[in-house]
Amino acid sequence: MEPLKSGDSHAPALLTNLEVMELLQERVAIREAASSSDGNNNNKLPSLFQARDWIEQTVFDYLNSSPAGSSEVKLDDMPKLVKTLRREPSATTTATTDADDNKLDESSDVVQGYGLTTAETLQVLNHLPTSLVELHLLIEDLEKRIPEEEKQMEFLRLLSQYSGRDVEEAAGEEEEEEETSDMEK
């Protein structure tokens, strides 16, 4: 995977944990293939890059245990998710679908968008939040930018489609479900 270059030549390109993990996985695989082709003859000498190898393996193991390391994460679909996260919520269109097959609000011709900054988008992709509390920690002024709790839950469900992680329902919704099930008994 080749990191995308940012517009500013002095600013480094930002990589998600998924991209770093994929890069490290490729490096470890190349090293393992090279060591297996060399045979056991060179195993007597310590590796000149032993510290680098240890660091890369440790970082890979950490990222693999993080939300980004889930085997259900759909890396190929992430660019479409990033476009949705970054798009301003007020964008409108007259067509029922746009060129990139992004979802539209069916009740009106408003393209779904959340207007996140680059840093917020990176944080969301790295942490893949599953609860409203996590979402509030990652997105500044969430209650002003996405005021309705149902819209916030839609945001979490959208992330869930890409991450494969279940959304933790809001406390109010859980209590209502419990009251409804208690009444039925």
Image: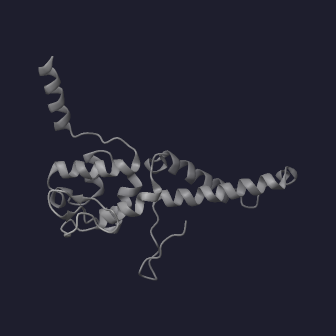
Q: Name the outermost residue toward the right.
A: 41
Up/down of 173 relative to 110, above or below:
above
Percent from the top left, x then y, of residue 13? 46, 72
Colour treatment of the image: one colour
Hey, which residue is sitting farthest top in the picture?
Answer: 185
Residue at image position (82%, 51%) is 43
Q: Quadrant of the N terminus?
A: bottom right
Q: Nearer the viewer, residue 152 or 63?
A: 152
| Residue 162: image location, x then y, percent | 39, 51
Tell me if 9 is positioned left or right of 44 in this view. left
Q: Residue at x 17, y 23 (%)?
A: 181
Q: Position of residue 141 (x, y in %)?
A: 20, 60
Does residue 167 sit above or below 2 in this rendering? above
In the image: residue 108, left or right of residue 50: left
State left or right for residue 101 relative to residue 180.
right
Residue 166 position within the rendered picture, expressed as x and y whole percent measured from the top left = 34, 41
Quarter location, residue 11: bottom left
Q: Is residue 3 left or right of residue 175?
A: right
The residue lying toward the viewer, choosing from 22 and 62, is 22
